[in-house]
Amino acid sequence: MTATATTTPNTLIARSLIILLMIVTLLPFLSMLSAALAPQGTYPNGLQWPADPQWGNFVRAFEVAKMDQLLLSSTLIVLGVVPISVLIATMAGYGLAKLTTNKYKWLYLVFVFGLTLPFEAVITPLYYEVRALGLLNTRFAIILPLIGLYMPFSVYWMRAHFLNVPHDLTEAAQLDGATRWKEFWLVQVPLARPAIMSLTILLFLWTWNQFLLPVVLVQDPMQRTMAGALGAFQGQWGTDIPLLCAGSLLILAPTVALFLLFQRQFVAALMQGAVKG
Amino acid sequence: MTDKTTSIPDALPTSKRLPPSRGSRKTRTAAWLFVAPAFIAYAAFVLAPLVMSFYYSFLRWDGIGEASFHGLTNYITVLTDRDLLQIIGNAFQLVLYFTLIPVVLGLAVASAIRSHMAGRFGTITRTVLFLPQVIPLVAAGIAWSWMFASTGLVNQTLKAIGLSSWARGWLGDFVWALPAVGIIGAWVLLGLCTMLLVTGITKIDPSLYEAARLDGARPWHEFRYITLPGLRQEIGVCITVTVIAALASFDIVYISTQGGPGITTTVPGLEIYRLAFAHRQVGLASALAIVLMVLVLISIAPVQWFTRDKK
């Protein structure tokens, strides 16, 4: 703790409150873990360390859920969505912040309008659109709409960054198109790295955890995101509690592992993301 | 980290000293080229579907055969049908849980701690409290379906403390299913709100509290006149995020209750999905979608208005 925070009753209350919150946060995970280790086909109790932990349940869940294929599918979707989204949003953010006059404010407002739009509001037409494109039940059915759906937040985010970059940098060079493009890559993008990093983390998480689009647009769980596949897994194995819990824990392990590795960056990105979103 | 958030980008005096090149034709072309890819993606997969949603909402269409013009009938149905009104009401009831619990608990923790959470304790707290934000909502739904199951931890705890008569299958209960779903959402959003408020309160000048204490202010007064106004922006953020999460909820409900029992936990997001793809009432689904979009907008607008920094 900081030097100023002595152990007054207040900080004691605060600490106990926080520890209580942490316990409440962790209990569902522990409860799932204890169920995941119960013998197959049994109906375990909420939280009870099994006498004979069945670590093999995880192996079985890995095979049943075809985790290797799921990981591949989710990774392909993330690779299809995130780099392109970040690139075109960075370009647009730069364009809107640095190259346009107030006359084009409406263009920015059109993007911002999408910020509060629930995905459910467009999911029905998206289905018919994706079907007309012949992409139903392919990963592109998730990739292409997500790029569009992420634009309001991403453009908003990058524009806010570029507005804070001092003007002198852009004024320094009187630029024609080609040099403008070079300046963007050599000067602006390197400077924007923290904003780009946070955006990448957020888009990765949102894509990996996306559920509505895969449920509506992709039937085959093997072509879905992790979250979409988990939905199908629950539909199929919902009654086998140990297997369901083991599978769920496996499916959420990759993001949790990444989160623990890059804890600082994730927390920063999530907090800023909430503030801006 | 958060200093960016205090400056309102739009308020920067950018327009006052435009570089000479800004208005020129060359720059305008460049601007369009930079913005175009993002705009095309946005137009193709958000604006166009939105327009189509609006168009569908005036049709009677099963998604396959001929569509016929239906006027405002779909909207009238959405706003008068008892089931649909209950479904919209369910979403607003969820707001109570999704918003109130995280904000109240977050405020309690923030005003008790009122300092940076540095060191190892801070890191551990942040890591743990953010876990629900990192996992898919689907996983939260599965975890809590198990918590609320008849042999789950909730009932196990109730029995352990002698309240066996309270034990029940929570998610299958006509009265308790919706509050149970609300608790799941509160669990997901609790950590985020707490951390936002704790971070926010450290930015309030501590001398304000000292001055108040010298003047003999009660803790309640400190809270009312220093903490609440000081955290206005952060509270606004929490409310915005949680209200949208409640009104547009889908994943948690789909996984934990499928909207049941009856329609006691059905929310607009789930009903849109059902109407459009199971009942083949594309027109009605689209009208509900437009209504949902408008409801989110008008619920958020006053929050934004009240909590914007009026510097």
Image (tube, coloured by chain):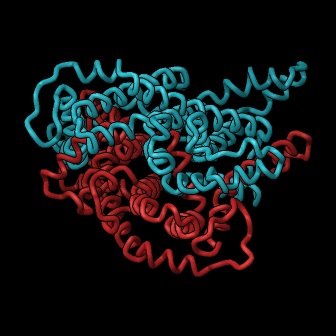
Observer able to see residue A145: yes
Residue extending farthest to the left is: B66
Q: What shade does chain B have? A: cyan
Return the residue nearer the eye: B91 or B118. B91
How many dots with numbers? 0
Apparent side of residue A92 relative to residue B150 in the rendered image (left or right): left
Tell me, what hue is chain A?
A: red
| Residue A270 place in picture, x, y as percent | 53, 50
Please tell me in which quadrant of the rendered image residue A52 appears: bottom right
A190, A171: nearer the viewer = A190
Foreground: B67 or B163?
A: B163
Q: Position of residue B209 (x, y in %)?
A: 81, 28
- Image point (75%, 60%), residue name: B120
Residue A95 on image: x %, y %: 28, 44
Residue A159 placed where, x, y %?
A: 37, 42
Please indicate, yes or no, whether residue A168 appears anywhere in the rendered image. Answer: no
Q: Is residue B291 above or below residue B149?
A: above
Q: To which quarter of the image does residue B73 belong?
A: top left
Foreground residue among B92 and B215: B92
Query: Is A1 situated above or below A152?
Result: below
Q: Quadrant where the C terminus of chain B lies?
A: top right
- Residue shown at 49% from the left, 20% from the top: B302
Question: Is B119 on the left or on the right of B277, as rendered?
Answer: right
